Image (cartoon, rainbow, N blue to C red):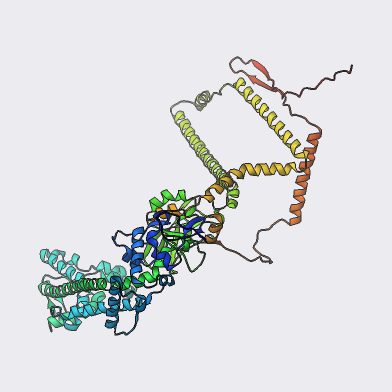
């Protein structure tokens, strides 16, 4: 670690710097560094702001630091927290320990901020009945929970009295009434329709045909069907029977209602009217409204009291949370030390978990808050990103993540592929890849990329051509079949009208008169083909001569071909890998990144781990049959020997293929005159032979 003094003229503190992620960054390691954060030039901060929500960090700690409550933590708020801690703690090095407890001796008693913290802490301990010379965050949480329960008890004791309609069983009575309320309303409405038109009674009652359809079944398994029938038989008197005549599917619920409500309000009665039933509903609804209003009012009153009291003890809670979290926040704000520290137990606050897909584990996964903005900015990062939609049925939540793939190949990755994501708590989520941002992963992957793309292109072309030919053949077959059917029908129709089939055939033949053969057109085509074959043959002869000239020429040729195909892809990959930066992805999700967050090849390889298998020496009964190694070797020896012999012969006997003139005979249809055309094809010019000059 290099020490740089007075890097910026306005600084009075000697900052230390080191290399993290290929970038020179300031080092925050001691309490002294934290105490002088207000002297650090803002241009040297890695982050200018970050969101309060959506990070793997205690949200309440960030909320206490967010002084303007805008949902963002900015540089000035981080500095303000450091200045406040400087006025509270006797030793700023205590922050580097990350503890959530503190002794009173470590708090300044001669500053206003320190006095507030000590007073709040002693108040909490006295209410808890503790006698200690220190306090922890657990003590604060216990006190808040106890205080909330006490506020509820105080509110209930001073609440206005209300007499429940059915005593201690009012809640059960409320449940019983609500369980059958809709069915009773349906019964009284049917009775009103019977009063309106007596002839409608059979239709409004349960129909015998419906019972007949289920009579052959096990009626014990048909309770859902029976439950859809009326609660009781509708009648003009519009009285609900209490002692019998209730739908069997509703008898249990009605018996509970009768015991808790009807026998209390109407003891000994055999039936009740709709007016009496509405009186029961009025009492139950009033009880429900009282409960809801009381609970809502109590919740609001208690929440307000807890909030007011929490503000009074906020200084001690703020101190304990900052003692635990502040140093870690600096390592993810001023510098990205946690991100570049390769420790399974320590990760950056923006790393949401691990994605397992295609026999690899991607550790660089970031929650996506704005998917369209992430898609627009992700390409600038130069990283291969998998944008995934995650669903957790256990938590009942959904979210989107961006997972960076920094090692391996991509041949089996595609949109729609399923995977598993584990968040920082270990909870698993179902994952579907929704979009892929394609960028190079490594030089090795870039080397094979053109061949893989060419192979995919060839496969797609073959499949497409096969599908087109199949479709074309099917269309031709159906067209011919339709034409034959139509022709047959036309012949039959023509025969019926008196026109002979021969005349119809003659008309069809006249329509199909052949087009005259264009001799000049085809002669030109043959000439062009001859010239092309001549030049192609000459090229391969020269190529064969070059290969056979020296034994290493074939290696040079193979190397040249590889460079031509893979060179551009590898060069582009090298340029992008050097500039691979996580900053654009974070910027798209609420961060203000002030410096490069490089992910080079070496570091990237640690962010994606590949599956590794041991070498097994055993027989697989279901393995594909492979050719023996000696057969493969023999075939390659024969191929190379043949190439060498052909190349050697070509160098010994140089020749150039010359196509013969094309002779085309054509017959003119118009005057039946036969024309014979010869189209000469020029052979490549022979090399001039130098004439020997006689010696004088």
Q: Position of residue 90 (x, y in %)?
A: 37, 73
Task: Determine the residue positioned at 41% across, 74% down.
Answer: 99
Q: Position of residue 539 (x, y in %)?
A: 70, 33
In the image, residue 570 above or below residue 488: below
State left or right for residue 536 relative to residue 548. left
Q: Nearer the viewer, residue 17 or 629?
A: 17
Residue 541 or 259: which is nearer the viewer?
Answer: 541
Q: Is residue 168 above or below residue 447?
A: below
Q: Residue at x 28, y 74 (%)?
A: 115
Residue drawn at (11%, 66%) of the image: 195
Name which residue lies at 26% across and 67% down: 209
Relative horizontal placement of residue 452, taking residue 92 as reference (left or right): right
The answer to which quarter of the image holds residue 175 is bottom left
Q: Quadrant of residue 323?
A: bottom left
Residue 636 visible in this rendered orientation of the protein? yes
Where in the figure is residue 361, as x and y percent of width and height?
52, 62
Given residues 569 and 411, the one toward you in this image is 569
Q: Residue furthest right?
A: 696
- Judge left or right: residue 382 versus residue 637: left
Q: Is residue 216 among the parts visible in the rendering?
A: no
Locate the C terminus and report the quarter of the image it occupies.
top right
**583 above or below 132?**
above
Q: Nearer the viewer, residue 178 or 533?
A: 533
On screen, residue 682 versus residue 487, left or right, reads right
Numbered label tally = 0
Q: Position of residue 618 (x, y in %)?
A: 68, 67
């Amino acid at each position: 670690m290099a020490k740089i003094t007075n890097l910026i003229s306005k600084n009075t503190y000697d900052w230390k710097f080191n290399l993290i992620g290929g970038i020179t960054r300031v080092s925050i390691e001691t309490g002294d560094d934290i105490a002088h954060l207000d002297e650090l030039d803002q241009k040297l901060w890695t982050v200018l702001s970050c969101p309060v929500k959506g990070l793997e960090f205690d949200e309440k700690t960030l909320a206490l630091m967010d002084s303007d409550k805008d949902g963002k933590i900015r540089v000035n708020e981080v500095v303000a927290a450091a200045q406040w801690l400087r006025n509270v703690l006797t030793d700023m090095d205590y922050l580097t320990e990350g503890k959530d407890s503190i002794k009173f001796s470590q708090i300044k008693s001669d500053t206003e901020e320190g006095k507030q913290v000590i007073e709040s802490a002693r108040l909490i301990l006295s209410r808890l009945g503790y006698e200690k010379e220190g306090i922890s965050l657990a003590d604060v949480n216990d006190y808040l929970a106890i205080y909330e329960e006490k506020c509820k008890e105080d509110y209930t004791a001073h609440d206005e009295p209300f007499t429940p309609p059915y005593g201690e069983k009012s809640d059960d009575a409320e449940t019983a009434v609500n369980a059958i309320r809709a069915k009773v309303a349906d019964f009284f409405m049917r009775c009103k329709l019977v009063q309106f038109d007596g002839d409608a009674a059979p239709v409004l009652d349960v129909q015998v045909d419906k019972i007949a359809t289920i009579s052959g079944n096990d009626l014990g398994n048909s309770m859902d069907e029976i439950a859809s029938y009326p609660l009781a038989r509708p009648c003009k008197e519009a009285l609900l029977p209490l002692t019998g005549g209730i739908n069997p599917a509703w008898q249990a619920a009605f018996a509970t209602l009768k015991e808790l409500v009807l026998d209390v309000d109407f003891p000994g009665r055999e039936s009740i009217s709709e007016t009496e039933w509405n009186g029961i509903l009025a009492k139950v609804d009033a009880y429900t409204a009282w409960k809801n209003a009381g609970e809502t009012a109590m919740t609001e009153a208690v929440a307000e009291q807890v909030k007011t009291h929490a503000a009074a003890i906020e200084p001690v809670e703020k101190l304990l949370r900052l003692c635990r979290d502040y140093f870690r926040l600096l390592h993810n704000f001023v510098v990205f030390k946690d991100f570049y520290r390769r420790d399974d137990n320590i990760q950056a606050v923006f790393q949401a978990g691990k994605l397992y897909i295609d026999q690899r584990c991607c550790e660089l996964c970031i929650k996506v808050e704005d998917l369209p903005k992430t898609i627009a900015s992700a390409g600038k990062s130069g990283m291969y990103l998998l944008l995934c939609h995650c669903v957790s049925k256990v938590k009942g939540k959904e979210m989107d993540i961006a997972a960076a793939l920094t090692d391996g190949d991509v041949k089996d990755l595609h949109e729609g592929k399923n995977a598993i994501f584990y968040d920082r708590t270990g909870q698993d989520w179902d994952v579907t890849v929704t979009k892929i941002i394609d960028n190079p992963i490594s030089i090795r992957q870039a080397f094979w990329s053109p061949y893989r793309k060419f192979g995919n292109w060839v496969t797609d072309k073959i499949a497409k051509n096969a599908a087109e030919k199949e479709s074309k053949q099917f269309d031709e077959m159906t067209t011919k079949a339709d034409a034959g059917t139509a022709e047959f029908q036309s012949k039959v129709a023509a025969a019926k009208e008196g026109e002979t089939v021969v005349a119809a055939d003659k008309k069809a033949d006249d329509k199909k008169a052949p087009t005259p053969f264009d001799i000049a057109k085809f002669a030109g085509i043959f000439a062009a083909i001859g010239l092309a074959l001549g030049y192609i043959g000459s090229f391969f002869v020269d190529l064969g001569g070059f290969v056979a000239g020296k034994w290493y020429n074939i290696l040079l040729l193979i190397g040249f071909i590889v460079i031509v195909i893979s060179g551009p892809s590898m060069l582009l990959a090298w340029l992008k890998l050097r500039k691979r930066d996580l900053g654009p992805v974070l910027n798209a999700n609420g961060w203000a990144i002030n410096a490069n967050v490089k992910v080079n090849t070496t570091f990237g390889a640690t962010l994606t781990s590949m599956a590794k298998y041991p070498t097994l020496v055993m027989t697989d009964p279901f393995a594909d049959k492979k050719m023996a190694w000696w057969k493969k070797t023999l075939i390659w020896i024969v191929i190379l020997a043949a190439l060498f012999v052909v190349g050697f012969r070509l160098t010994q006997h140089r020749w150039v293929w010359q196509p013969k003139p094309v002779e085309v005979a054509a017959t003119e249809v118009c005057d039946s005159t036969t024309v014979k055309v010869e189209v000469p094809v020029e052979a490549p010019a022979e090399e001039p032979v130098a004439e020997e000059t006689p010696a004088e």
